[in-house]
Amino acid sequence: MGLPALEFSDCYLDSPQFRERLKSHEMELEKTNKFIKELIKDGKALIQALKNLSTAKRKFAESLNEFKFQCIGDAETDDEICIAKSLQEFAGVLQNLEDERTRMIENATDVLILPLERFRKEQIAAAKEAKKKYDKETEKYCTVLEKHLSLSAKKKEAHLHEADNQVDHVRQHFYEVSLEYVFKVQEVQERKMFEFVEPLLAFLQGLFTYYHHGYELAKDFNHFKTDLTISIQNTRNRFESTRSEVECLMKKMKENPHEHKSISTHTMQGYLFVQEKRSFVSTWVKYYCSYHREPKRMTLMLFDQKSGGKIGDEESFTLRSCTRRKTDSIEKRFCFDIEAVDRPGVITMQALSEEDRRLWMEAMDGREPVYTLNRDSQNEAMAQLDVVGFNVVKKFIYAVETRGIDEQGLYRIVGVNSRVQKLLGLAMDPKTCADVELDSTEWEIKTITSAIKHYLRMLPAPLMTYQYQRSFIKAAKLDNPEARVAEIHSIVHRLPEKNRQMLELLMKHLAKVASHHQQNLMTVANLGVVFGPTLLRPQEETVAAIMDIKFQNIVVEILIENHERIFKDMPVSGGGQGNSQLNLPRRRSADSKAPSCSERPLTLFHTPTFSEKDKVEKRNSVVVNSSADSVNCNSTHNWTRLNSLPTGDGDHDGLQLAKQNQPNSLPASPSPTSPRSPSWPMFSAPSSPQLASSPSSESSPISTPPRKARALYACKAEHDSELSFIAGTIFDNVHPSREPGWLEGTLDGKTGLIPENYVEFL
């Protein structure tokens, strides 16, 4: 129930009821006054808390903005760039929000605290002053009235008349003060309805403006949030794939540490104990040593493994010779002596084991062991990019597209290995392939999809080849998306024809699979995770190579999304799209790039029964001896032209295919006595036979200027005229030789022959 109204007429009566009503108004004003004081106190505390919160959130935003993600590798994927950018985006949103909060806090004092204090001081305080005056006048009036009424009637008339006038004057003044006080009390009661509530409304309006600004920020942030969510999911998928690969490599390293040495730019590196003579006492000091084969430079660094700190400066010298120490010549095991060009005396070093000493010895005399991925040779022999392989893949793809393209987790769910092996064995066997009915429920979709992936992994070299693996990775690392597509487009058309045809077949199929991602949940990104490591597996199994799997996945994603453009249209020469990144000098010119699989000539092998004259004649005619036991060397019936051989993925594969077509046309293995038969490379070197130079090439003058070249594979010389080298070796003064398929170059001051298909020009 509300307050009773105060009538002005009651001021003249000044009845007890009037006084009770007036008292209820006074109590309400006092209550309002206390409430406003508490509200101002709480408001100031709230504003201070908001300031503290804003300061904390700004500090939080600054921390987010200052932190920078660092990825493993020399480039980031679009998803990683988005994730790395997310912290700055979060910081920007928070800072923007706090800017609006700061404006709200600054306005809060003006719109809430000051009006409330002004209302309390000006209105309620005025009412209190009026009450004091009213109470004073009431006391004065009552005193004067009592004094007047106590006068004796016997007083003189003039004196009584004067007393009456005085009482009337005091009464009139009391009535006026009473009226003013009643007016002020009711005025304040009415004013508080708006002057008290209006500041609260203004403050809430500031809050609403702040929250609305946050809502607008959230709407603007929603697009980035969606992209970030997708990027996080893609990165999580790639992480799962990469983690399993790294874990597998770690297990291999644990089981066979000597078979998986770390590949490094150094020829050899590791810890060695060096014998140092001090005051006629020999001490052994542990150094971390690095040996670069090309300049024959040995670097020693004193390093404490326990503290992880470097002690002193590096010391380096040029190696002159390295000699193994005999066991009976020194008390220590695993020792060898080295002599330096720019350092006197002999330096005795101790390796960590016999195997470690052997590796150091091989490195220092030019023999560097190269570690390659372990492969199943039986499976490699089974899977080829031939008619059988194409028919099997087409048959499998048709079954997947007609039977199970909507199955969830397609290509991600793995089939039972024994059934996958059985299916592949039956499908690739000419005797049983016709009997394989893929429409039968005997073969689950996951078995068929696993068979496709297993076939691709069984190929001797990945479908996108070792040669272009790094090129694809570099293309995926370009900043401009259009530049990536254009570069990958160009590289795809450098692949061998059969590789490109199989890749096109597969990408068309994966595009169909991705178009049903609403049902099978296999997006383009998910398919990239599945097929990236299969189609672009690295030649060297290292952690760095595994970290590039995410870029392998991106290459596959680009191939799937742009398969029509990439496989139907020829790439635009010289880059294209007007993008500056495409015009960078990334690719080698046609005369200096490494020969492709279809361009490298097959090495010629013949038996020692030929005369030197016959050797020269046969060398220029690009033919292969039909039998090691042949007697009639001049008979053309015993030779097969190389351009009639089917294309294979490697030199060995090409010989095997030729042997299948003409059982008696080739020797079972290269002749070890052939004067121009380089040893098989320790790396897989895919190549296809090609028609060699014409007979007249030997007599034609060659004017190509000498250049530098880098070895792509390792080769061990079997004749004095040839050079031995490892992968990565740099040759000087390289120029064409008169020997078909061979170049002539200089290595460490020695000039000799180099297989043409083993190097790339720089």
Image: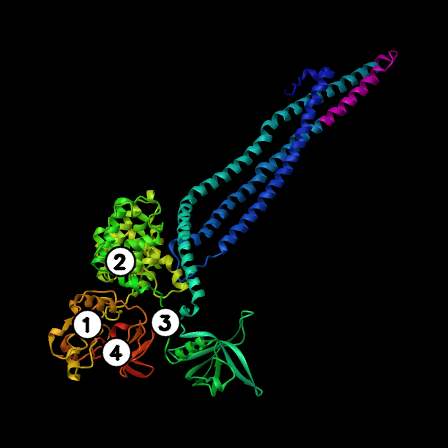
Q: Magenta stretch mostly in which secondary structure?
A: helix
Specify which label sits upstream in the sequence, 4 or 1.
Answer: 1
Q: Which residue is under mark 1?
A: 666
Specify which label sits upstream in the sequence, 3 or 2.
Answer: 3
Please give the range of residues in magenta. Answer: 131-158
**Along the viewing direction, whichever of 116 and 416 lies nearer the viewer:** 416
**Residue 703 percent location from the top left of the image:** 20, 78
**Along the viewing direction, whichever of 498 and 626 lies nearer the viewer:** 626
The amino acid type of the residue labelled 2 equals His
Q: Which residue is under mark 4?
A: 672
Q: Is residue 501 above or below residue 606?
A: above
Q: How is the image coloured?
A: rainbow
Q: Secondary structure at mark 2?
A: helix
Specify which label sits upstream in the sequence, 1 or 3.
Answer: 3
Q: Which residue is under mark 2?
A: 489
Q: CA distance from mark 2 to mark 4?
A: 42 Å
Q: Nearer the viewer, mark 1 or mark 3?
A: 1
Q: Secondary structure at mark 4?
A: loop
Q: Say if residue 117 shows up in the picture.
A: no
**Residue 369 percent location from the top left of the image:** 37, 74
Q: Nearer the viewer, mark 3 or mark 2?
A: 3
Q: Residue at x 42, y 67 (%)?
A: 256
Q: 735 left or right of 550?
A: left
Q: CA distance from mark 1 to mark 3?
A: 29 Å
The amino acid type of the residue labelled 4 equals Pro
